[in-house]
Structures are given as structure tokens and as C-alpha cells.
Image (spheres, rainbow, N blue to C red):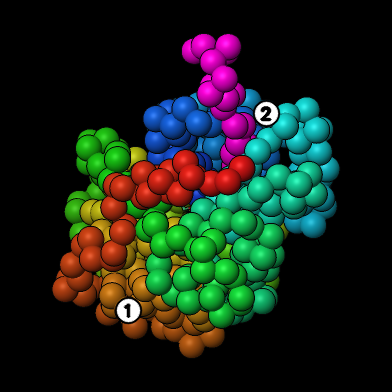
Amino acid sequence: MNFFNPFYSLPRRLAVIVGTRPNFVKAAPFLREAKNHPRFDYTVIHTGQHFDQNMSEVFFAELGIPRPDVFLNPGGEKHTEKIALMFDQMKDVFKQHKFAGAIVFGDVNSTLAGALAAIKHNVRLAHIEAGLRSHDRRMPEEINRVIVDHLAHLHFVTEQSGVENLRREGVKERKIHLVGNIMIESLELYRNKIEASPILAQLQLKPKGYILVTIHRQENTDSKQALAEILQLVAGLKNQYQVVFPLHPGTKKRIEEYGLASFLTGLTVIEPVGYFDFVKLTKDSLGVVTDSGGIQEETSHLGIPCATLRDNTERPVTLELGSNKLFPIAEATSSEILQHLKRLDFKPGLIPFWDSGVSKRIFQVLDNWEI
Ligand code: UDP
């Protein structure tokens, strides 16, 4: 590099803010592609929202994500307290670095805290996975999505519904970019490693011989009644199929607190697993029962039936394909769920731009971003 060259300019520094399991899966292809774009330097900020081996470290190791430059340690009990502490701790990082831009992913509390920190420090903000709407303001994630999208200067969108939502909310056309689903890019990038996962043998499972379950949404776990209803539905599946249930730490805590552990009898309850193991478990399952956002997308891409235990979804393209079906917990029955999971007629890979070119499309825009 020739620093005396008048046309040489120092790389622009971007803050890349991550904090949870789905954030890590989305950040991996972004940071991998970033190496090919010398216009930028990066400071990776880990908010500490998910911090342990199962929920954080395994993703950095498996997906080759560079070690974060900054680790926050927000502590706090309530969600609101945690958001405030993350936001406050980011202040020093933003003061120290002169960021030209900030990148946030998805809809979690770390996304909101990162977006607020960027805007308060006059830093331009790009939101990856913008525009999704469940139109259900009871969901904390929906509030996060709406606020972050209205603060952001650039919106990278996964599906056409997101483009329409942003237009309807008055976001200018030039800020909206339908680039596809970066979480699916991870899946494509690591297909061989996913395929090679030994998890089926380890758990003594046969392909299509088991159902995979994950539950973690706050509206499902913060109410004893809702969680009991869900566990009852899940328990109703175990007579016909083995049920594998990697238990999210938040859900585990609630099950213990509410005294609901007896519902887990007869299920294969395990700790959350790494990314390769989880996608392998998904791919070879009969079907998946979940309230996760990302897992609705991964099952749709893989053509695996998914029963989503929610009243609505912010990812309507997954319903259009048919492989994902909503089962509102107040009305659902285990036998209806089972009937859906036994369908074998779904085809993989049908959603436009859900492929391995997403981060390249994002950088086509970032390389020309006026920052
Ligand atoms: N996942 C994982 N191990 C697990 C459960 C999920 O690696 O035990 C992955 C899954 O493949 C997907 C992401 O975590 O890529 C989804 O995260 P989560 O369901 O926690 O969040 P959401 O998508 O609902 O925001």
C-alpha cells in the first residue's frame, strides 16, 4: 500500500454486531466474503447475549468466524435491562472507533441495541434480514424489526414480502435490496460438513425415524400455560416416533421453574447442538416442530415438513411452499401435526435467491455505499 499516493484512502471501518446463535449463523458468510473487499475494515462486537459453549463458542469454531474484537458483558435480568446495558456498553466502543457504518442481523435484542448505538453515534446502519413482519406486536422480535428497519439506511431483504412491507412503511426504494437469505448461504457453504456430522449414529437415530423439536420464543416460554400446552402437544408425538428435543437454556429454565419436567419423559432431551449436527438432524428427520424463525427457513429450503407452533409467521414465503404450516397452540392437536410431518411431497431449494450468492450480492451494494 502506498500511503503517499493521493488516490489511496484508508479502509472504512464497519462495526459488525452479533450476539445470538442465529446472528452467528448469518454473520459467518458475511465475514467470509468481507475478506475480498478491501474497501472496509471490521470490528466484530459480540454483545454477550448468548455466551456459553453450546450457544456461542461452537458456532465461532465450526463456522470459522473470527474471534470478536470486543466482548460485552451486559449481565442484567430482564430483557429491557439487558438491552439497555448492551446499548450503554457499546458507547465506549463507538467512541473509540470512528465507524463509517454498522451491520446488524435479524431481530434479536442485540440487533436492537446495536442499531440504537449506531444511530446515536451518527453511524450509518445496514440491516441484514430487513422487512420481515409478523404484524404481531406481542412478539418482542417484531418490535425489534420495526424499530431497526426505521433506523436503518440500507435494508437487505430475504423474501419479496419484506420488500412490500418496507415499501408500505414508507422506506425509500433505493434503500431496499432483495438479496436473499444469508442463513441459507451458510447451509450451502457447509453442506459437506453437515452431511458428515456423526450425530445420527451418536443418538442411534434412523433417517426419517424421528421428529426434531425446538422451542424458545418468549411468548411460548414466559407463560406456564402456553409452555404446558406445547409440551403436551410434543409429548403426544412420542408414541409413533422418537422425539429429539435439543433444549434451549431459556426453555429449560422455565420448564424447571414451572414444574413441567414430567412432560419430557420418553423424549430424547439433549443439550443444544452445534450447527452441523443441528442441520443434519433437520435434514434427516421426518419433520420438525418449532417456534424458531430460522428453522422455518432451513426446513423450507431443505424440503422438510415443519410444524410451526405459532399463530403467525414473519416468513410467509415458507407457508406458500406448503412445507411450513402454522399450528396455533390453542387449537392444534398432536395428530394433525403428525399428519403434516408425514407428508413427503415437498421439494428442496425453490425460493428465489436462497443460495450461496447472498453475501456477494450484499457486498455489491456495500462497495458502492456512500459512507
Ligand atoms: N441451531 C443450532 N443448534 C440447535 C438449534 C438451532 O445450531 O440446537 C441453529 C439452526 O440451524 C439455525 C439457528 O440455530 O441456523 C436458529 O436459531 P434459533 O432457533 O435460536 O433462532 P431464531 O431463528 O428463532 O431467531
Residue 41 percent coordinates (x, y): 56, 28
Residue nearest the viewer, comparing 206 with 14: 14
**Residue where numbered disc 2 is placed:** 70
Q: Nearer the viewer, residue 57 or 284?
A: 57
The quadrant in which residue 68 appears is top right
Residue 342, percent across and down?
A: 23, 73
The location of residue 271, given as percent across then percent down, is 48, 44
For the point 68% across and 35% down, the residue is: 99
Name the image quarter holding the C terminus. top right
Question: What secondary structure is found at the residue carrying circle 2?
Answer: strand
Which stretch is magenta?
1-20
Q: Residue furthest front?
A: 6
| 344 on left or right of 71 | left
Q: Is residue 187 magenta?
A: no
Secondary structure mainly formed by the magenta segment: loop
Give above or below for 229 relative to 107.
below
Quick check: 40 above or below 230? above
In the picture of the structure, the residue carrying the numbered disc 1 is: 320
In terms of secondary structure, where does tag 1 sit? helix
Judged left or right of residue 259, residue 262 is: left
Tell me if mark 1 has few (under 14), some (14-19) or many (20+) residues whose alpha carbon lies within 10 angstroms of its own. few
The tag on residue 278 is none
Identified at 23% across, 54% down, the residue is 284
The answer to whether residue 197 is seen in the rendering is: no
Tell me which numbered mark, 1 or 2, is placed earlier along the sequence: 2
Compared to 266, does 306 lie above or below?
Answer: below
Name the amino acid type tagged 1: Glu
Residue 6 inside the magenta-drawn segment = yes
- Three-letter code, disc 2: Val
